[in-house]
Each structure stands twice: as structure tokens, then as C-alpha cells.
Image (tube, rainbow, N blue to C red):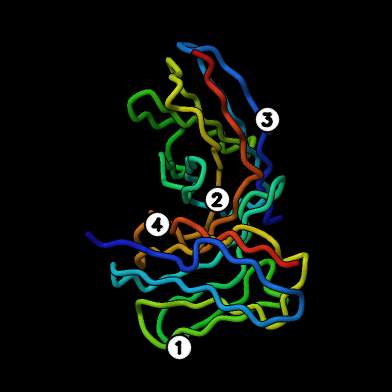
């Protein structure tokens, strides 16, 4: 029940394309869903986050879509750029950044 | 600037030895966390603390311990290092009621 399942494990997208990463959860008590971006040799950094009272949140080229009934959420990266190449983790928690449960990660490569 | 630092960045140790990884944050955050990152598993919570003298077990706490004697530091101790504990370890901190967690740069630990 504490798991967050993330797919795909790896993704290759052409520059300018749309990158889509999906996550699913079981625990309906989760009320905070962040996405973290990690570059090689660095720690994860918060990219964007959503709470279940909204279905979509957009920040620049990054959008989270949230489907509460399906217990799924996804990250969309529009106009993907080579600088977006990184590993992306979805996560979930109860009560904010208290105890984050992470997905398995997606290694995204944007080809120039 | 406030930050969170981990030391050492890399360590090689032998099976059976006690190892301590340091984590220091200058944000004065109440919450501190230790995660391990392994391919295919994302980040998994080892131990966490919500304040001085408070420590709690996470998902994968066996073989690890922490202590919180002040706000700034949460050292992680491997009592008797095992090869299964070869991993990259991340420390994170967050403020109570604030959603974002800040991660350190990580410590790559190899147990031989």
C-alpha cells in the first residue's frame, strides 16, 4: 500500500517532443505528490508538486496531471530539451515532505 | 547560503566494519531523513527525525541507526557493514508544514 509504481524505466525523446512519465499509487491517504529531478552526481531536486484537490498543475514546460479516481499522476515535459536529460522520480507522502515514498525512477534522454 | 552537506562523498569499507555517514544542514529544519538509492528501487527511506532526540525507523532500517543530538546533524551509522549496504546514500531535510525537501549531494558507499 505504500508503493508508488513508476513507468517507464527509461525514455528517449527527440528534442522538441513531449516526454511523459507515469506513476500509480495505492494508498488513498497520500495527499502530496512531488516530482524530483536528479542529474548525475547530484541529489534529487524538487521540480514540481501537486495536491489532490487539483487535476493539473503547470510550471513552464512542466505539467503534472492528476487523476484521483484512477490513483495515477503523470509528468509531461513539453518542448523537451537536451538539458532535461536526467532521472525523474515521482513520490508521494502524507502531510507534505514528511516521509516521501518514491517511484523507481525514469532515466530520460533527450536527443538533439 | 543555507545548505545541506554530506561527508564523505565516497567511501570504501570492509565487511563487518562500523561506518558513519555525516549529514549537516544549516537551514535549521526540524525534519531530517536518510534515503538509500539503488537501481530499480528509487529512493527508500532508512531513518528519519522530526526534531532533537526524535528518531524513527523507515522502510529499510535494519543494520542502520541514527541519533539526533542537535538540529543541524543526523549521522547515519552502519553497525556492521554488509555488501548489501553498498549503495548511494542521500540525506534530506525539510521544515515542518513545508512541502519541499532538500537533498544533499549523496555519499557513495562501497562495502567490500
Cα distance between the residues tagged 3 and 4: 25 Å
Which chain is mark 1 on?
B
Which chain is mark 4 on?
B
Q: Secondary structure at mark 1?
A: loop
Q: Nearer the viewer, mark 2 or mark 3?
A: 3
Cα distance between the residues tagged 4 and 2: 15 Å
Circle 4 is placed at which residue position? B102
Cα distance between the residues tagged 1 and 3: 40 Å
Which residue lies at the image location 60% right of the left edge and 63% below the top edge?
B45
Do labels 4 and 2 touch, CB within 8 Å?
no
Circle 3 is placed at which residue position? A8
Where does residue B72 sit, x and y in percent of width and height? 35, 76
Circle 1 is placed at which residue position? B53
Circle 2 is placed at which residue position? A92
Cα distance between the residues tagged 2 and 3: 18 Å
Judge left or right: residue A73 versus residue B82: left
Q: How busy is the neighbourhood of tag 4: few (under 14 within 10 Å), some, or many (20 plus)?
A: many
Which residue lies at the image location 68% right of the left edge and 33% below the top edge?
A9
Which chain is mark 3 on?
A
Residue in the foreground of this view, choosing between B63 and A78: B63
Residue in the foreground of this view, choosing between A48 and A45: A45
Which residue lies at the image location 62% right of the left edge and 60% below the top edge?
B36
Whether A52 is drawn above or below B70: the answer is above
Q: How busy is the neighbourhood of tag 3: few (under 14 within 10 Å), some, or many (20 plus)?
A: some
Amino acid at each position: 500500500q505504500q508503493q508508488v509504481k513508476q513507468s517507464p524505466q527509461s525514455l528517449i525523446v527527440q528534442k522538441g517532443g513531449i516526454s511523459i512519465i507515469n506513476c500509480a499509487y495505492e494508498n488513498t491517504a497520500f495527499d502530496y505528490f512531488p516530482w524530483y529531478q536528479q542529474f548525475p552526481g547530484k541529489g534529487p531536486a524538487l521540480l514540481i508538486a501537486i495536491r489532490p484537490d487539483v487535476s493539473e498543475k503547470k510550471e513552464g514546460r512542466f505539467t503534472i496531471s492528476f487523476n484521483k479516481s484512477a490513483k495515477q499522476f503523470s509528468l509531461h515535459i513539453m518542448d523537451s530539451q537536451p538539458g532535461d536529460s536526467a532521472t525523474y522520480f515521482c513520490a508521494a507522502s502524507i502531510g507534505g515532505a514528511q516521509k516521501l515514498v518514491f517511484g523507481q525512477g525514469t532515466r530520460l534522454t533527450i536527443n538533439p | 547560503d543555507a545548505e545541506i552537506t554530506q561527508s564523505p562523498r565516497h567511501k570504501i569499507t570492509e565487511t563487518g566494519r562500523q561506518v558513519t555517514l555525516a549529514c549537516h544542514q544549516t537551514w535549521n529544519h526540524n525534519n531530517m531523513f536518510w534515503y538509500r538509492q539503488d537501481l530499480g528501487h528509487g529512493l527508500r527511506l532508512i531513518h528519519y527525525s522530526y526534531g532533537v532526540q526524535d528518531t524513527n525507523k523507515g522502510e529499510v532500517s535494519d543494520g542502520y541507526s541514527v541519533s539526533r543530538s542537535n538540529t543541524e546533524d543526523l549521522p547515519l551509522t552502519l553497525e556492521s557493514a554488509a555488501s548489501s549496504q553498498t549503495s548511494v546514500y542521500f540525506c534530506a531535510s525539510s521544515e515542518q508544514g513545508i512541502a519541499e525537501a532538500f537533498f544533499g549531494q549523496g555519499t557513495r558507499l562501497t562495502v567490500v
